[in-house]
């Protein structure tokens, strides 16, 4: 899955590690249960583009 943070800041918890992404950064997450994750906005609002392969 290819994703982009357009504005503000997002934190993604991958279980063993938390990673912060700021506006302008690309997020790449591999498919599968081993890559389970949970996202939360660090700022009051986050603008994203989410693209999923079908």
Image (cartoon, grey):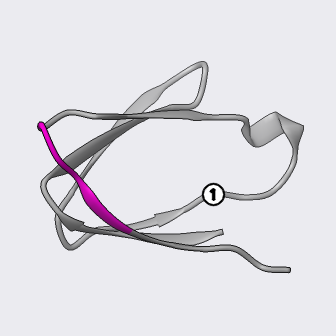
Q: Image check: 34 left or right of 6?
A: right
Which residue matches tag 1?
A: 29
The image shows residue 15 at horizontal and vertical percentages of 61, 20
- Is residue 22 covered in magenta? no
Mark 1 neighbour density, 10 Å: few (under 14) some (14–19) many (20 or more): few
Q: Image check: 54 left or right of 46?
A: right
Determine the main secondary structure of the stretch shown in magenta.
loop
Look at 58% across and 19% down and name the residue there: 16
Q: Nearest the camera: 8 or 44?
A: 44
Q: Image check: 47 left or right of 14?
A: left
Q: Which residues are magenta?
A: 44-48
The image shows residue 12 at horizontal and vertical percentages of 44, 37
The image shows residue 9 at horizontal and vertical percentages of 19, 48
Q: Nearest the camera: 3 or 14?
A: 3
52 vs 41: above or below = below
Look at 73% across and 58% down and name the residue there: 30
19 vs 30: above or below = above
In the displayed orientation, state which residue is furthest to the front: 45
**Quadrant (top left, top right, bottom left, bottom right) of the C terminus:** bottom right
3 vs 46: above or below = below
- Is residue 46 covered in magenta? yes
Look at 87% across and 48% down and name the residue there: 32
The image shows residue 36 at horizontal and vertical percentages of 72, 35
Look at 20% across and 33% down and name the residue there: 42
Q: Image quadrant of residue 23? A: bottom left
Q: Image check: 37 left or right of 50?
A: right
């Amino acid at each position: 899955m290819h994703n982009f943070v357009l504005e503000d800041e997002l934190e993604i918890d991958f279980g063993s590690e938390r990673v912060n992404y700021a506006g302008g950064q690309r997020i790449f997450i591999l498919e599968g249960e081993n890559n389970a994750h949970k996202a939360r906005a660090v700022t009051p609002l986050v603008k994203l583009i989410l693209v999923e392969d079908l």
